[in-house]
Amino acid sequence: MPLTFRKSIRILPGVRLNINRRSWSLTTGGRNGPRRTYSSSGRHTTSMDLPGPFGWRRTRTTKRH
């Protein structure tokens, strides 16, 4: 089983810095509303939990120069 590294640091209420071996990301928002995630790899994700076993997610990837 390979070793993995993942660290999540709460910067402010509703703002988290997530770090793993290959990239980092910044997540804003809370549990009861939409969340936005901005990744160093160019990915922007908006997600939201819906009532029951449902969830909604939209991901956009921008080209890196």
Image: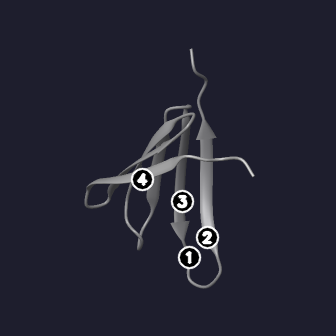
What type is the residue that disc 4 sits on?
Ser
Mark 4–mark 3 Cα distance, whole angstroms, equals: 18 Å
Q: Residue furthest bottom?
A: 52
Mark 1–mark 4 Cα distance, whole angstroms, equals: 24 Å
Q: Nearer the viewer, residue 19 or 64?
A: 19
Looking at marks 1 and 4 on the same chain, the residue that comes earlier in the sequence is marked by 4
> Label for residue 23?
none
> Label for residue 50?
1
What type is the residue that disc 1 sits on?
Leu
Looking at marks 2 and 3 on the same chain, the residue that comes earlier in the sequence is marked by 3
Tag count in the figure?
4
CB atoms of marks 3 and 1 within 8 Å: no
> Label for residue 8?
4
Badge 3: few (under 14), some or many (20 or more) residues near its Cα, within 10 Å? some
CB atoms of marks 1 and 4 within 8 Å: no
Q: Nearer the viewer, mark 1 or mark 4?
A: 4
What type is the residue that disc 2 sits on?
Gly
Image coords of residue 37 (percent x, y): 47, 48
Looking at marks 2 and 1 on the same chain, the residue that comes earlier in the sequence is marked by 1
User: Could you say whether the residue bearing mark 3 is in a helix, strand or loop?
Assistant: strand
Mark 2–mark 3 Cα distance, whole angstroms, equals: 7 Å
Residue carrying label 3: 47
Badge 2: few (under 14), some or many (20 or more) residues near its Cα, within 10 Å? few
Image coords of residue 63 (percent x, y): 61, 24
User: Could you say whether the residue bearing mark 4 is in a helix, strand or loop?
Assistant: strand
Q: Residue furthest right?
A: 1
CB atoms of marks 2 and 4 within 8 Å: no
Image coords of residue 65 (percent x, y): 56, 14
CB atoms of marks 2 and 3 within 8 Å: yes
